[in-house]
Amino acid sequence: MDSTASEIIPLTSLSRGKRKRASSESDITSLVIQEVAHDAKLAALLSKAAHPYFRALFETALIGIWKKHCSQKELSSRDYFSDFMKFCSCHKVTSGLTKALDSFHAGRKTQRLGKRKLIEQLRLDLSDSGRIAFLSNIKKVTLTCLPSPYPPKGYWIYTEDAAHDCWEDWILYGHQADGRIPRRHLLQIDFSSLQLVISETESCIIRDAKDSSIVAVIIRNFCNHDEVLSWANSVVCDVVQKKKSIRLEDPGVLAQIGYSAGSRLAPKFDWVKNLQSTALSSEEVDELDFSSSSVFALFWNLCKVLLPQEIIDDFNEFLKANNLCRMDKEANPTSSALGRYVVGVGEGSYYEFNKVEMAPPAGVFGWNYSRATHSESQPHAFALSWTTNRSSQSIGGDFFISSHGIQIKSATNTLVAWRPKGIHGTSLQVRQPDDPNPDFEQTGMSIVTSSRLPSVWKKYKNTISGISQLDFESHGEEIDDLPDI
């Protein structure tokens, strides 16, 4: 540290009784620094604070110290870590704290170099011209809309007899989670009725022959980093084991992530509460939610640089028109679109991204999920999905778009953008319905939005501004109106 820097106030002069009272901002900050310097565990956390996890632990402790000496008003908008670091840079500190700060700065330099390389590998720094060049190398197909959608609406579809044998009894005679929903029949795909089959290794942009609008976009090797892909998939797998599925009548798990409009009987704009167990601590729940929003933030930012602009414009217009918040539990839901997320790169290493755009407010994680052919209305024209893993030699689980007779074969690390208003569905998988650990495994996520979310969000904003009232404390299911992806 600079030898000409001013002295910090000794800890003894700031204690209770007849000693000097820490009344000024400088006095309080000095006391905070002294407490950190005299706590070996805190100094050790500071030395490793270039890592987001250890920084979060250090900041939590730092806030606790600061709160002992500041009023609530003074704490309202404080950047604790930055204030701490600025004060340390212009004041003399103990040799132990100096060593911890030196370790932090060295770690941060390494982090910055690694983060720059990661951004390049993920293509997050791709320019508009770079995106145009990337998309120019993807196969383009133009298709006419079928006179009658195929496969038709309302069928469980399958491509192999083995899938029919696995699911026939479960679908036609098995227990129904909701007896009001009519049973659907099974339909084997007639490949001669399809116009296009996209292979597992093929990327493609499909447009309608009549108006040149995008029907679907398929990008293989979407995430250009194996360790990041593995991290994203591990988050999905962890979350789907701990959260309730919102489609109990369908095979697999579909877990809602982010903000929910609540049920129709009890509308409530809130972060979704759908854990299977109450055994998790609040810290564990926060970590689960932060990991989820981080994966979605990465997903969204990759979409922004790799997808055709008209798809991103569709989402941007929806978000702007409704002034919607983003999928960020850490932030006030009325605040900006910018937030913080991390990206895992293996062996417990993470890179932190700050003041970056977060994902749209709602989405789902899925595990071995299938649904009969259907359509739904969303408040934006496109939906986005990312398959993070598919076990090798699996059969079934392919995606079909009926308006143009398209089969998209499922594969690990695949992005699909499509129009959910049209009929679509996922084929049944060759696996036993009641096998908790099947050989078949397909996991991923989708950015989808309840058609009710904008209106409930508007009422929520009006309520907190005192314009109107909505009963947000009503009891009822937290999840109800998610699109049927």
Image (cartoon, rainbow, N blue to C red):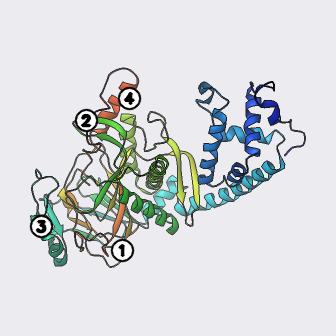
Residue 390 higher or lower than 250, as above or below: below
N-terminal of the pair, mark 1 or mark 3, is 3
Which residue has dot 4 on it? 461
Which residue has dot 1 on it? 391
Distance CA(mark 2)–CA(mark 3): 35 Å
N-terminal of the pair, mark 4 or mark 2, is 2
Residue 450 higher or lower than 417, as above or below: above
**In this orientation, does residue 329 appear?**
yes
Kindly identify the amino acid type of the residue bearing the numbered disc 4: Lys
Q: Residue at x 73, y 44 (%)?
A: 36
Other-residue count near label 1 (Cα within 10 Å), few / some / many at <14 / 14–19 / ≥20? few
Q: Residue at x 26, y 42 (%)?
A: 477
Which residue has dot 3 on it? 186
Distance CA(mark 3)–CA(mark 4): 45 Å
Distance CA(mark 4)–CA(mark 1): 44 Å
Residue 339 higher or lower than 123, as above or below: above
Which residue has dot 2 on it? 266
What secondary structure is found at the residue carrying circle 1?
Answer: loop
N-terminal of the pair, mark 3 or mark 4, is 3
What secondary structure is found at the residue carrying circle 4?
Answer: helix
